[in-house]
Image (cartoon, rainbow, N blue to C red):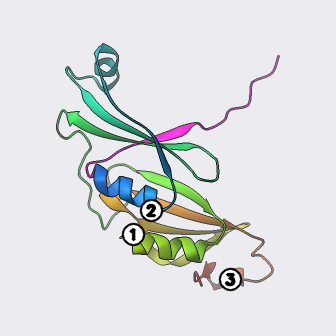
Amino acid sequence: GGVDPIRLLGVNIVVDDLDAMVDFLVGLGFELVADSLLDGPWLDSIVRTDGAVLNYLQFTSPYGGGQVNLLKYVNPDQIAPKVDPTIPYAGQIRMISLLCEDMAETFEKTLELGATRVGQGTQVAGDFRVGYVLGPDNVLFMLMEERDWRDTINQHAGNVALAE
């Protein structure tokens, strides 16, 4: 027998400002499907501390795909390292990738929800236009739009296309 295909179920992101992150995801159309507290010997063994308590929120995308799970430590009070918000990749990468039908519309929506753009315009990578915004709690969001850009964009101009 061969290997079963692997399918992404979800990604866990530890956040400090849970309310801001919930508002951001809900504003993008994600649906909260579970909200619970996790604790006990199993969690203690995973995070290697005694008495760990996590607030665990599970979100589904409105158009399918994997889940985003937000985790906030209740105890210990702060476990995620602080990062410089001007350097999104400092310390650890906390990134959520979103495939968008209309990247410009999604960029506008994220900005309305309080995100800030990272970098200049968007990069073209093969058939994808890719751009970044920094959302709540310094979580980086990669926005991707699929199209055949190769015939319409001069690749030698730095592969940059502004989100129009």
Pointer 1 or 3: first along the chain: 1
Left or right of 1 in this view: 51? left
Q: Residue placed at 72% from the left, 83% from the top?
A: 153
The magenta region covers 1-17
Residue with the mark numbered 2: 27
Residue 75 picture quarter: top left
| CA–CA distance in space, label 2 to label 1 | 7 Å
Question: What kind of element bears circle 1?
Answer: loop
Q: Residue 148: x percent and y percent?
A: 78, 72
Residue with the mark numbered 3: 156
| CA–CA distance in space, label 2 to label 3 | 37 Å
Q: Is residue 31 magenta?
A: no
Q: Is residue 121 above or below residue 106?
A: below
Q: Magenta stretch mostly in which secondary structure?
A: loop
Q: Is residue 162 above or below residue 43?
A: below
| CA–CA distance in space, label 1 to label 3 | 34 Å
Question: What kind of element bears circle 2?
Answer: helix
Residue with the mark numbered 1: 113
Left or right of 102 in this view: 21? left
Give the amino acid at mark 3: His
